Image: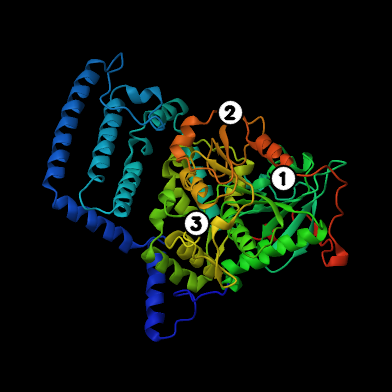
């Protein structure tokens, strides 16, 4: 497909365009790449409709009086049990809220503080929802913004109102605060010097992570292709091609050996290939979605076909790589290309109409200031992407960490997944704009408008057996959104819903504690079952879903054969070096 013009990314044609682009880019820098107009419009919509809703305001006043009465009763009882005992509480935190789990929060005077905060949270939740006339999107933005402010103002975050911090400070005679200050100074120094978090240096790619033996057998300006060395005498004849997202580095699937999905596949007798994407810079600003399709996925398919000829391929895509795989599979089905034996998707969306809270950051206004900023840099920085994800999980990724490291003086031990998460990548300007507009904003893929080679593709053409994994607490690709593939594709779909989030739910090696999953196969052409009905009827299995996938692949593979040669120099795919290659090391 041809690259369409993308607003603000090409050199502006007029002085007015140049001025507007510079102003929008300046706004983006001043607001951490968040559109102030989006927030302002949402606030006006909410405040205006609330002002015109006397009934809703009366309900809020009534709720405030009721809460004050309940809080007064709690204060009286708390005073009675101030010395010894625990007063009954008038509001309980959410089951997933761990902020007030410590026993100290349930004794005077901190019980009053946490009850006051929880009641305020309850009131603002009521105030920002179910207001007549407010659009769903604006309601979600206002509600989300209120939660961010409340999270910031929580008594947990202050050393004077957090009893756990006060107790630790008394016990340690303040040394925890000294350690916290040193942690903060070190973090600030690393931030200024653009260094990874403390401890990440213990996980070096090629030494500690990304160590599964293999060779680079293809390379172009966008990707390197790794062919992993077999460890079994016989292998399944159909190779596995992994297409990770370029928003992440591929070794999320090849972490420490005990957590490596790549190593696990190789040990189960599969010939595994994996794409390692280049980390783009300003010279790659014009790379688009079609480049990732042609120079990435299709180029990798050609290489695998040359190295393992006359064999179909088990194609696997993770996150955005899975979306790209669905686009490619639909185009191949349309064009009669039958090279795929199966399609596996990890936390990948095809329909973007309900992307969860990530969608709060995506509208025309938001994209326009991103485009203006990327027009100057040529890419979306890793920090911009990381900031958006921190907002989605502000308690876990920001405030909880700040309390532990800066107030309690406790550094969370670094692990391989955390080190990988800090090793972020950039996104080319044109590609990221197309991704946001075509997929998120316009939902072209699920609605049959996404073009490949000048013609739209339809997911309804896909007949490839599909293994689809979603995770219960995914903030990037919510599982109900991933599940929508059931009504977009008529193919056989084996759907797995596993515990964990976008990354931890996929890196779920056998033996990992507290892992569980549901699994069910919908036969090709079967009737649709709604996601909640599916979840209610599927049995819960304990353990890792990896073994289910291995069994699924085996059932769709032929009898074992001798491992193929590494590379195919006679076909233009000579061995270029050892894994993990060069692109993954780019910063």
Residue 385 is marked as: 3
Quadrant in the picture for residue 163 = top left
Residue at point 25%, 42% (across, down): 124
Residue 259 image point, x, y percent: 68, 39
Q: Secondary structure beneath disc 3? A: helix
Instruction: Report crowding for label 3: few under 14, some 14 to 19, many 20 or more residues within 10 A (C-alpha).
Output: some
Observer-nearest of 246 and 204: 246
Query: In which quadrant is the C terminus drawn?
Result: bottom right
Q: CA distance from mark 2 to mark 3?
A: 34 Å
Q: Which residue is mark 1?
A: 262
Q: Which residue is mark 2?
A: 541
Work out whether 159 lies above or below 136.
above
Observer-nearest of 3 and 44: 3
Residue at point 49%, 46% (across, down): 184
User: Which residue occupies the extreme top position in the image?
Assistant: 84
Give the side of residue 250 with respect to residue 7, left or right. right
Q: CA distance from mark 1 to mark 2?
A: 23 Å
């Amino acid at each position: 497909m041809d690259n369409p013009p993308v607003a603000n990314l090409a050199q502006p044609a007029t002085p007015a365009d140049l001025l507007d682009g510079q102003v929008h880019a300046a706004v983006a820098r001043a607001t951490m790449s968040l559109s102030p107009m989006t927030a302002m419009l949402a606030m006006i919509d909410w405040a205006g409709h609330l002002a015109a809703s006397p009934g809703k305001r009366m309900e809020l006043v009534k709720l405030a009086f009721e809460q004050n009465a309940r809080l007064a009763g709690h204060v009286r009882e708390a005073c009675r049990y101030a010395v010894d005992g625990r007063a009954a509480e008038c509001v309980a935190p959410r089951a997933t809220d761990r902020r007030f789990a410590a026993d100290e929060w349930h004794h005077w005077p901190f019980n009053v503080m946490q009850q006051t905060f929880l009641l305020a949270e309850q009131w603002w939740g009521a105030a920002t929802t179910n207001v007549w006339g407010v659009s769903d999107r604006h309601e979600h933005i206002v509600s989300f913004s209120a939660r961010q402010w409340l999270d910031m103002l929580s008594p947990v975050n202050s050393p004077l109102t957090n009893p756990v911090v006060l107790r630790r400070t008394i016990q340690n005679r303040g040394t925890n605060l000294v350690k916290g200050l040193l942690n903060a100074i070190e973090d600030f120094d690393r931030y200024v010097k653009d260094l990874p978090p403390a401890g990440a240096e213990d996980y070096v790619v090629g030494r500690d992570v990304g160590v599964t033996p293999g060779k680079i057998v293809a390379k172009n300006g966008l990707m390197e292709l790794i062919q992993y060395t077999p460890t079994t005498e016989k292998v399944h004849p159909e190779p596995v091609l992994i297409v990770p997202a370029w928003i992440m580095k591929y070794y999320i699937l090849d972490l420490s050996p005990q957590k490596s999905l790549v190593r696990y596949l190789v040990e189960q007798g599969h010939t595994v290939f994996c794409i390692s994407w280049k980390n783009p810079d300003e010279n790659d600003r014009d790379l688009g979605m079609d480049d990732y399709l042609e120079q990435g996925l299709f180029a990798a398919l050609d290489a695998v076909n040359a190295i393992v000829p006359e064999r179909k391929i088990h194609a696997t895509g993770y996150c955005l790589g899975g979306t790209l795989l669905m686009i490619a599979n639909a185009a191949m089905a349309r064009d009669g290309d039958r090279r795929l034996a199966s399609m596996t998707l990890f936390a990948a969306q095809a329909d973007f109409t309900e992307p969860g809270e990530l969608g709060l950051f995506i509208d025309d206004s938001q994209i326009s200031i991103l485009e203006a900023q990327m027009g100057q840099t040529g890419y979306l920085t890793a920090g911009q992407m990381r900031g958006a994800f921190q907002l989605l999980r502000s308690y876990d990724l920001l405030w909880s960490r700040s309390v532990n490291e800066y107030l309690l003086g406790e550094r969370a031990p670094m692990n391989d997944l955390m080190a990988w998460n800090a090793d972020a990548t950039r996104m080319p300007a044109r590609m990221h704009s197309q991704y946001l507009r075509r997929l998120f904003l316009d939902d072209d893929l699920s609605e049959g408008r996404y073009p490949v080679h000048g013609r739209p593709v339809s997911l309804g053409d896909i007949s490839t057996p599909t293994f689809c994994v979603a995770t219960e607490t995914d903030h990037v690709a919510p599982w109900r959104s991933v599940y929508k593939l059931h009504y977009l594709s008529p193919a056989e779909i084996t759907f797995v819903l596993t515990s964990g989030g976008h990354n931890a739910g996929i890196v779920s090696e056998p033996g990992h504690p507290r892992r569980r999953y549901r699994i069910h196969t919908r036969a090709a052409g079967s009737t649709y079952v709604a996601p909640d009905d599916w979840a209610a009827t599927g049995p819960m299995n304990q353990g890792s879903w990896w073994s289910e996938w291995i069994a699924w692949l085996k059932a769709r593979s032929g009898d074992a054969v001798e491992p193929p040669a590494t590379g195919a120099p006679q076909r233009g795919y000579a061995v270029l070096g050892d894994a993990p290659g060069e692109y993954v090391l780019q910063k």
